[in-house]
Image (cartoon, helix red, strand yellow):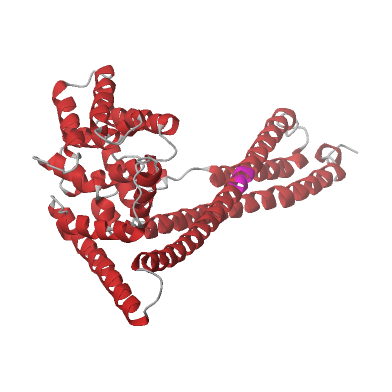
Amino acid sequence: MTENQLALIREAKAFVSDLLADKLNKNIRFHTLEHTEEVVAACERMANYYHIPDEEQTALLIAAWFHDTGYTGGQAKDHEVLSAQLATDFLASHNVSPETSGKVISCINATRMPQTPVNSLEKIICDADLFHLGTDAFREKTNLLRKELKNFGDEEITKNDWWKKNIEFLEAHKYFTTYGQETLQPIKEVHIKGLTEELSDLDDKTKKKKKSKNTDDIVVEALQIEDDEKKKKKEKSNQSERGIATVFRIMAQNQNNLSGMADSKANILISVNAIILSIVISQLITKLDSNPNLLIPFFALVIVCVSTIVFSILATRPNVNHGIFTQEDVHNKKTNLLFFGNFYKMNLPDYDWAMGEMLNDKDYLYSSIVKDTYFLGVVLAKKYRLLRIAYNIFMFGLILVILAFALAYALPHPMEIYKPG
């Protein structure tokens, strides 16, 4: 994408995020900013899968950001009308072409139930809007939708009836893209089968045991237990991820602090030795002719100072890689996108795509952070090794030079040895 297209998408994201944060009813539990972000991510994934042109992909992603903004109007019915109006005003204020605006509005309108997409962009956004039906997050999302219907739409539905309606909806629904049919439909079929079997088993158990509980209560209890288990697993996973993030953050801070300390120490050595060199050369160079004893300590001091400066510079000298990666490197998880030396020669769209691939793959992301941490440690070890050599040269060399000067002044002056008797 061009920089203008990326900037337009970023501004749409900021506008919608602020709008939903400020004006969305707190009783809305499903059609939130999180849902919008998930739809945008799904659209981007399928757009890359089908290699949608940049201009059309821009229209698709803007439509994804705006498709549920109509809920800020205070009602769910016909919210697409307000969503389309908000998108139209936004695009007009940014001087977007009528052709692109038309594609955005048609994509928003295509998400109206029942969905009726007529082209590839509309099919993608329709499948993205119901992407969760074919994922493991289905039960969590549909529970949020039920709470939203109860608290925001004043529609009271028992859990038993709710799951029956979900089964009917899942069976009637179809994905329009081949991506959805091949990737999401099989998981959706598993959900249909699981819900059907659960309701059937619960009905059979109720009849056999002749319990006073009706099927509604049993379904509620079974689903509540499952929800509680999922919440516990999710909380545990979130705690684990927060712990991992904290470890990486502390390691990065420590390494940055150590690197800054090494650079500071090297700068001190360079400055001190440069000052010593300038003083020695200006003060002693004229005395060498009159006192040859100073020749050896003079050159020894120069060698010590120059060697110290050289190793200090080597400790702080930057090293940059070739700055290029390929799609194959990203697919094979061979490149570290967190280090600038691996991507500074790449185009922005290529880097944007590669970062999207990495962020969508948790294993790849953690692997990149580990690699970045490791190679920073390698560079840091090299810095401190060279810095230690520089300090050793300066410390021991300075001691030897001082002894040499003391010896030079202690020895008889050559002119006095050859003075006529």
**19 inside magenta stretch:** no
The quarter holding residue 363 reads: bottom left
In the figure, 242 relative to 296: above or below?
A: below
Camera sees residue 31: yes
Residue 75 locus on image (x, y percent): 32, 33
Q: Nearer the viewer, residue 141 or 66?
A: 141
Q: What residue span does the magenta drawing correspond to?
A: 257-262
Image quadrant where one finds the N terminus? top left
Q: Nearer the viewer, residue 317 or 230?
A: 230
Q: Residue furthest right?
A: 421
Residue 69 locus on image (x, y percent): 32, 32
In the figure, 238 relative to 6: above or below?
A: below
Q: Residue at x 20, y 42 (%)?
A: 125
Q: Residue at x 13, y 50 (%)?
A: 176
Residue 87 locus on image (x, y percent): 26, 26
The quarter holding residue 172 reads: bottom left
- Residue 128 is left or right of residue 313, and the answer is left
Q: Residue furthest bottom?
A: 208
Q: Main secondary structure of the magenta part?
A: helix
Q: Residue furthest left?
A: 118
Disc tally is: 0
Q: Residue at x 79, y 45 (%)?
A: 402
Camera sees residue 1: no
Q: Residue at x 16, y 52 (%)?
A: 175
Image quadrant where one finds the C terminus? top right
Residue 329 locus on image (x, y percent): 28, 55
- Residue 175 is left or right of residue 74, and the answer is left
